[in-house]
Image (cartoon, rainbow, N blue to C red):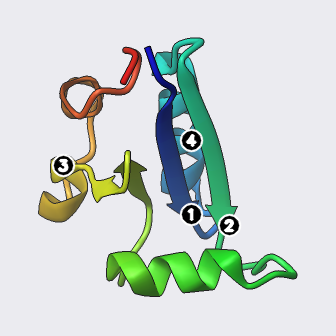
């Protein structure tokens, strides 16, 4: 089984913090969770490049294995949708 790559894009707001907490709560040992706070871009600018590559225009956004979770496209992020996206299970 491979690792499931989970990326969370935030700006440090309370909604973002709730999303990060939920993702970390749901993540299993096969989930590799990376949090990008775009309000304080990383030195390498990788976080900004990724937001452009994924077409992210608002946060919080959860990306699972290179695809924006369907719930983030609709604007309603919830536990059930994140589990359906594969968080908490091996790739």
Element marked by disc 4: helix
Query: How far separated are the C-alphas under marks 4 and 3?
Result: 15 Å
Mark 1 sits on what residue? Answer: 10
Earlier in the chain: of badge 1 and badge 2, it is: 1
Q: Which of 57 and 91 is in front in this view?
A: 91
**Residue 80, image quadrant:** top left
Label 1 close to label 4 by CB (< 8 Å): yes
Mark 3 sits on what residue? Answer: 71
Instruction: Residue at 25% x, 49% y: name it.
Output: 69
Up/down of 26 relative to 23, above or below:
above
Label 1 close to label 2 by CB (< 8 Å): yes
Q: 82 left or right of 21?
A: left
Mark 2 sits on what residue? Answer: 37
Q: 69 left or right of 37?
A: left
**Residue 30, image quadrant:** top right
Query: How far separated are the C-alphas under marks 1 and 4?
Result: 8 Å
Q: Quadrant of the C terminus?
A: top left
Earlier in the chain: of badge 1 and badge 4, it is: 1
Rendered location of residue 44, percent (x, y): 81, 81
Earlier in the chain: of badge 4 and badge 2, it is: 4
Element marked by disc 2: strand
Classed neighbour count for the residue bearing mark 3: other residues with Cα under 10 Å, few (<14), some (14–19), many (≥20): some
């Amino acid at each position: 089984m491979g690792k499931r790559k989970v990326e969370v894009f935030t700006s440090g707001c309370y909604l973002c913090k709730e999303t990060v907490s939920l993702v970390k709560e749901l993540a299993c040992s096969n989930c590799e969770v990376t949090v990008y706070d775009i309000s304080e871009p990383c030195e390498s600018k990788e976080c900004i490049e990724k937001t452009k590559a994924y077409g992210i225009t608002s946060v919080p956004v959860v990306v699972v294995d290179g695809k924006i979770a369907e719930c983030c496209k609709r604007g309603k992020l919830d536990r059930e949708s994140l589990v359906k996206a594969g968080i908490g299970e091996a790739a």
